[in-house]
Image (spheres, rainbow, N blue to C red):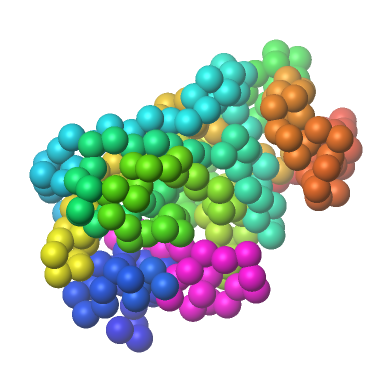
Amino acid sequence: MSSVNRFSIEYLLSEDVKPTKRLRENVDSDDEVVPSKASKLCEISPRLQLNLHEKILHPALRNVVVSLEGSALWKRFHTLGTEMIVTKSGRRMFPTLQITVKGLLSTATYSFMVDFTCIDNKRYRYSFHQSKWMVAGPGDAELPSRLHVHGDSPALGDHWMKQVIAFDKIKLTNNQLDQNGHVIVNSMHRYQPNIHIIVSDASGDYVCKNTFVFPETTFMAVTAYQNHRITELKIESNPFAKGFRECEIEEIQALAGLRFPFSPFFLY
């Protein structure tokens, strides 16, 4: 097992490690992060990803219905072109990705995970004269996809169906050398969050998954907000932005566009 990356899906799905142990070793915590106890993220193997997709009709997933919490707010942002701040140290998302789920088997065991897909192979810039995003050229090299595992995973279906499932520990970073388990993205690129529900069999091994995508959660990764209407909506709808209570100085600068007010799109 020493040769397997503990951020990888291979490790999560390995035969000789059960889900409880795998997830405990990748615990998501606000404490100091060390490589073996970083946020619960991992790189995805395309081969295993395909194998899991082939089994989506498993009885434990057949009747699952997922709803996006705060859908109205997400749609307001989506209409304007959602932007998410990324930093070297990692920044949490707002709006927060939250869901509710129905149709799970009460006594089956599930894990909830999120990864992010770069929507296209393009790099963008914001045109202030036209107030819209425009293609600036080919995209940067695609980064290894990391998987964020919800902190309650694994748990029985009954547990998941009784609560709002919030992925509020996800942090976005543009640091390609990140060792803290944050989700690595390229600034000025568009991303789509993907929500995965993975079911475990009686022996504790992961056997299949189903994936849910909400188009209104797509966003542009930025180091400073480009569209002033996004800035205004973030301040209006984010309780931590109102009065900048408990808000980091870096976030204040990003919201106000103070770092480079005349050309924030150069903040790659």
Q: Give the number of marks.
A: 0
Predominant secondary structure, magenta span = loop
Magenta residue span: 25-47
143 magenta-colored: no
Q: Quadrant of residue 266?
A: top right
Could you tell me residue 62's position as x and y percent? Answer: 15, 38
Could you tell me residue 212's position as x and y percent? Answer: 32, 36
Q: Nearer the viewer, residue 168 or 262?
A: 168
- The answer to whether residue 223 shows anywhere in this view is yes
- Which quadrant is home to the C terminus? top right
45 magenta-colored: yes
Whether residue 186 sits left or right of residue 118 in the image: it is: right
Above or below: residue 241 compared with residue 25: above
Tell me what residue is drawn at x 53 percent, y 70 percent.
38
Tell me what residue is drawn at x 24 percent, y 57 percent.
109
Could you tell me residue 77's position as x and y percent? Answer: 60, 23
Tell me what residue is drawn at x 13 percent, y 65 percent.
202
